[in-house]
Amino acid sequence: MGNRLSKIYTRTGDDGSTGLGDGTRVSKDSARVTAYGTVDELNSAIGVVLACGLPQPIEDMLTEIQHELFDLGGELCIPGSELVHETDITRLETRLDGLNEDLPPLKDFILPGGGMAAAQCHLARTIARRAERETVTLSHHDAVRSEAIRYLNRLSDLLFVIARVLARSAGHGEVLWKHERRKRG
């Protein structure tokens, strides 16, 4: 492990720049900082989901995902590093398939809701989508491994399925979009 932070503020970012993991200084609004910052935001949003009190298997799964997101943030913060791997993506897909297997097929769109944990999980899902978009934007300027983008894509799908599971397990049920609620004409 590298140096421990004994002092939280350094004043080195007062000019609007920040240091990447390799020591390079960049603007705080660079595509790279935006991408890994949103991954950090996603990790925090998953922390809020975890604070809702979840079934143990889902809590364990989301805790492991938090560690993987920290790895992904590190990969985005240190150009050229490889911290997210194909096995991480495959694990997400396996979990997704396993959880989705017991859910009824979707016939309608689902609105974010279904209890506090499910709603927070939907919020995390939307942050995952934004992190994915911002990582794609970064890939137009700098090298980004496809595993990073694919991980975020699968994670957002998994968070959607977890939200469905949480809504059902809490007894709230899923909130379906009522597309016929408006009278046409």
Image (cartoon, helix red, strand yellow):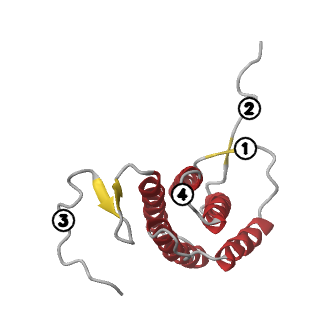
Does label 3 or label 2 sit earlier along the sequence? 3
Task: Report how far apart the C-alphas of labels 3 and 1 lie in the structure.
Answer: 45 Å
Classify residue 33 as left or right of residue 133. left
Mark 4 lies on residue: 142
Q: Are marks 2 and 1 in contact (CB under 8 Å)?
A: yes
Does label 2 or label 4 sit earlier along the sequence? 4
| Rendered view: 129 above or below 54 | above
Mark 3 lies on residue: 9
Q: Are marks 3 and 2 in contact (CB under 8 Å)?
A: no
Does label 1 or label 4 sit earlier along the sequence? 1
**Label 2 crowd bin: few (<14), some (14–19), many (20+), radius 10 Å:** few
Does label 3 or label 1 sit earlier along the sequence? 3
Does label 2 or label 1 sit earlier along the sequence? 1
Looking at the image, which residue is at 17% across and 60% down?
11
**Label 4 crowd bin: few (<14), some (14–19), many (20+), radius 10 Å:** some
Q: Are marks 3 and 1 in contact (CB under 8 Å)?
A: no
Residue 179 is labelled as 2
SS under mark 3: loop
SS under mark 2: loop
Quadrant for residue 102, please give it. Answer: bottom right
Task: Report how far apart the C-alphas of labels 2 and 1 lie in the structure.
Answer: 9 Å
Amino acid type, residue under disc 3 in the picture:
Tyr
**Label 1 crowd bin: few (<14), some (14–19), many (20+), radius 10 Å:** few
Amino acid type, residue under disc 4 in the picture:
Asp
